[in-house]
Amino acid sequence: MTLSPQFLDELRSRTLLSVLIGRTTKLQKAGREWRACCPFHNEKTPSFYVNDDKGFYHCFGCSAHGDAIRWMTDQRGLPFMDAVKELAQAAGMELPAMDPRAAEKAEAAKGLHEACADAARWFTDQLNGLTGATARDVLARRGIKPETARAFGLGFAPDSRSGLKTALKDYGDPLLVEAGLLIKVEEKTPYDRFRGRLMIPIRDPRGRTIAFGGRIIGEGEPKYLNSPETPLFDKGRTLYNLDKAAPAARKTGRLIVVEGYMDVIALAQAGFGEVVAPNGTAVTEAQLERMWRLSDVPILCLDGDSAGQKAAIRAAHRAMPLLAPGRSLAFVTLPQGQDPDDLVRQKGPAAFEALLKEPEPLVDRLWASELAAEPLDTPEQKAGLKARLADLAKTIADQNVAHEYQAEFRRRFDETFRPQRKAFEPRAPFVPQARGSRKAGQPWKPPITPPGEGAKNVRAGGIDRILAKAVLAGLIRHPAEIARHMEVLGSLKLADPTLGRLFEAVVDVAVEDAHQNMALDSQRLLTILAASGFDIIAHELLRADQLSCSFTQRDAEPARAREDLDEAIAILVARPEVDAALAAATAMMQTQYSDEAFERQVSLVKEKQALEARLANLVQANEDARAFSTEGN
């Protein structure tokens, strides 16, 4: 079917926008226009206007703007073609002719829709009749009010193999089987699919019944039974209660995703209309896309048990490739042993609202999951964590978001496994005290020194070449540390080719000695480097000591030298990645400015400054220690 611009313009002109919007939103006349409190966001003073002459609506508060078709897609949540069909039917317009196969398919779907609608009515009649007493008792015990049951079209399927089949016999068995209402096994006579169950209609975005979920009355398995896949019902693309939740979500600005039908119904009764459920399946990519049409950050509210937490992390992993700037997921974990239905019945809506106000961001859920995935006691296990986090970030298609996840995971890893240091603070200038000003019994303290020249030079001159030379000097003084950092040292790419070759030679020596089970000490390392033509530069590194760090000193305390060398290597590895990303972000800013590109560039500049501050702290700590040692002597 092709919809020409002329057809769409005619459709808009035949639709009186104030009447269409007035069906769900209370409008007040305001001169030649109509006004109301905006249905797309909460407000107390009307800022939403409808202009029939021009055929558009506009909100001066949230900038929502559109015509009749846009209203149907944005406020009602309908697909474009469904919106056009509904408006055309109301306007008395014939849609352009379909091809014969499409027309035949539409006619078949019409019959299936009618059969499902009649089945829903029959189930409701059974619930309210003599046979539905037990099902009504179940609803009463769960606190579901009669008006709530009516709003959701709840019903009851008697424990009979032919009750529904007889009631809908005019449709014929083949159509009822196709609609998922009857079961046909081989050559046996078809029989009712749902028997002895509380019936929950599943509706499409237009509010038409397309399938059912049936909950067992009493004991038995399975607890829930859903309709099979049919021409109307694609389980992986359908969200339960989307028809009611879409308008509510657009008004509240959030979407809540829960596990079960009864959770949705209980929360709606408690005042949370913006709730959907994924029909008893794991959340799919298609369902995520539907959620993001209504909210940039849907809140997944899952049970606190093991199954609920596994479902949460599966949804998190499935969402990763689809993330985009501003588009993510958040999570709320309920107390152990409770679901939303239990929570609102026992503690009221305020308790659930309190949980929704502090959702867990997606990045936090992923980090916690990977951190708990396996022990982290050995270097190999920590390397495994780093690799898993890197692989997760690589699954994100959007490069801006992927970079931010890489940087965030790297920051958290460093903070978790690097010994925490006191933040560098500029020292106050020395103030001489008058003789005798120190109180009796007060211990002597060394005077506070200003930042040393080493720390100043790091901040002023950058860190790349001088840091690489310092790390090399540290590795020569402490060759046992080479094996601990072999993987990252072997992958370093330095701008100075001589230093790069020296790094490679140092790693090669360590690898060769490890194969031969030989202990590597400084003198042996220098001897081997000399044989490879690196004797002059290696000795210069040890003599020059361009960067004053504990690991470049002969008499440094071993544990401190090892800790500081770990920090220096972490900075040396991170810097080229940050520089490359900053160069790319700067190029993007020069060719195609955007707020996202600017924010990324600012973030990378801050990350680069943080690396320089970390090195300045490292140098300053060593200078302070040396000053203290000198004064103490």
Image (cartoon, grey):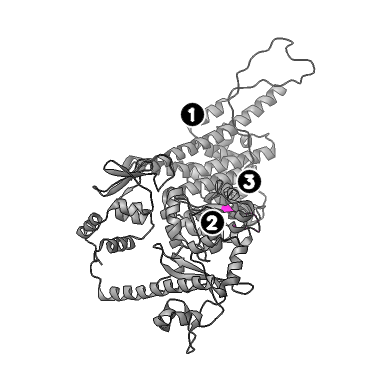
Q: Where is residue 192 shown, x and y percent of the image?
A: 50, 80
Tell me the SS state at disc 2. Answer: helix
Closer to the camera, 364 or 501?
364
Crowd band around label 1 with a 10 angstrom C-alpha radius: few (<14), some (14–19), many (20+): few
Q: Nearer the viewer, mark 2 or mark 3?
A: 2
Does the magenta stretch mainly form a helix, a strand or a loop? Answer: loop
Mark 3 or mark 2, which is nearer the start of the sequence? 2
Does residue 526 show up? Answer: no
- Residue 269 - label: 2
Q: Where is residue 489 shown, x and y percent of the image?
A: 54, 48
Question: Which residue is label 1 attached to?
Answer: 460
Q: CA distance from mark 2 to mark 1?
A: 63 Å
Tell me the SS state at disc 3. Answer: helix
User: Amino acid type of disc 2?
Assistant: Gln
The boundaries of the magenta stretch are 332-339
The quarter in which the C terminus is drawn is top right
Question: Which residue is label 3 attached to?
Answer: 481
The quarter in which the N terminus is drawn is bottom left
Q: Nearer the viewer, mark 2 or mark 1?
A: 2
Q: Where is residue 59 shown, x and y percent of the image?
A: 35, 43
* Pointers 3 and 1 in contact (C-beta within 8 Å): no
| 460 on left or right of 96 | right
Residue at left offset 51%, top offset 54%: 256
Tell me the SS state at disc 1. Answer: helix
Crowd band around label 2 with a 10 angstrom C-alpha radius: few (<14), some (14–19), many (20+): some
As drawn, which residue projects farthest toward the right? 441
As drawn, which residue projects farthest toward the top? 435
Q: Is residue 185 above or below residue 593?
A: below
User: Amino acid type of disc 1?
Assistant: Ala
As drawn, which residue projects farthest toward the left? 6
